[in-house]
Amino acid sequence: MVEYSERQGTPVCMSQSPLEKAVQFHRHVCPGLLMGVRAAEFALQFLRVSPDRDEELVAIVETDSCAVDAIQAVLGCTFGKGNLVFLDHGKHVYTIASRERHRAVRIAQKWGNLRGAEFERFRALAQKTDLSEEEELEREELRGRILEQIMSLPFEELFDYREVQLDLPPRASIHPSVRCVRCGEGVMQTRAVETGQGWLCRPCAGEA
Ligand SMILES: [Zn+2]
Ligand SMILES: [Zn+2]
């Protein structure tokens, strides 16, 4: 049975587990996604908060890998709400902050956490394109074992974490739009370029 709770007209499915939410959003199960589920669940516990509805939480992610889909699905910090901040550092690091609690936790994947022979073999098989039937079976068995490990290992074996001080970005606000004099399309005024001829959107200003 699916229960809905209404707030600001937004139905939120309450009965799904964090793992189910993440898999539904990401559409496949992979080690990266599950690492994200573990990080997101830990953040909720550590900060003593519920998943985000209206920008109470902010997530700063330093990767754009599978794990970030779990951060979005489980924590409700999303690109569209503006409370998902992406820093292109190529690091499995997630900083989750609560506006209400005035607290933030930085969660970093531990070096060497999943680097056993099993994991290396899984990676090699996952990257190979022409797998034999045997190799495919081996890969799926390894995947199952790795996924189980990720969900069952103590959090401290997978991640380092510490509380951090953070100046949070302001909540997303709505800005007026202006019309680009070159392409005629609307553009948020704060992103438009003012010229002698009038407003230009960034692509048109770049071409000009
Ligand atoms: Zn994935
Ligand atoms: Zn334009």
Image (cartoon, rainbow, N blue to C red):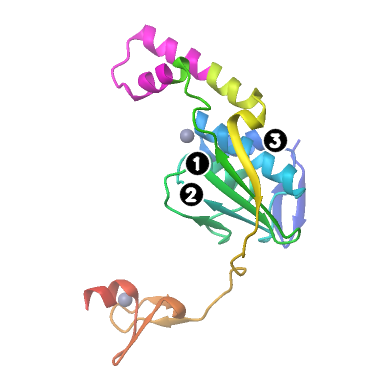
x, y (%) of residue 193?
35, 81
Image point 56% across, 47% down: which residue? Answer: 94
Q: Is residue 122 magenta?
A: yes
Image point 71% across, 45% down: which residue? Answer: 44
- Badge 1 or badge 2: first in the primary sequence: 2
Does residue 173 appear in this view? yes
- Badge 1 or badge 3: first in the primary sequence: 3
Q: Nearer the viewer, mark 3 or mark 2?
A: 2
In the rendered structure, the answer to whether residue 47 lies left or right of residue 185 reads right
Q: Which residue is mark 2?
A: 62
**Would you call the spot at circle 3 few (<14 residues within 10 Å), some (14-19), or many (20 or more)?**
few
Image point 45% across, 80% down: which residue? Answer: 189
In the rendered structure, the answer to whether residue 64 lies left or right of residue 168 reads left
Image point 61% across, 70% down: which residue? Answer: 170
Q: Quadrant of ligand 2?
A: bottom left
Looking at the rendered structure, the secondary structure element under dot 1 is: loop
- Magenta stretch, residue numbers: 120-144
The dot on residue 92 is 1
Does residue 28 appear in this view? no
The dot on residue 110 is none
Looking at the rendered structure, the secondary structure element under dot 3 is: loop
With respect to residue 4, does 138 lie above or below?
A: above
Which residue is outermost to the bottom?
A: 196
Q: Looking at the rendering, in which quadrant would you find the N terminus?
A: top right
- Tell which of 24 and 60 is nearer to you: 60
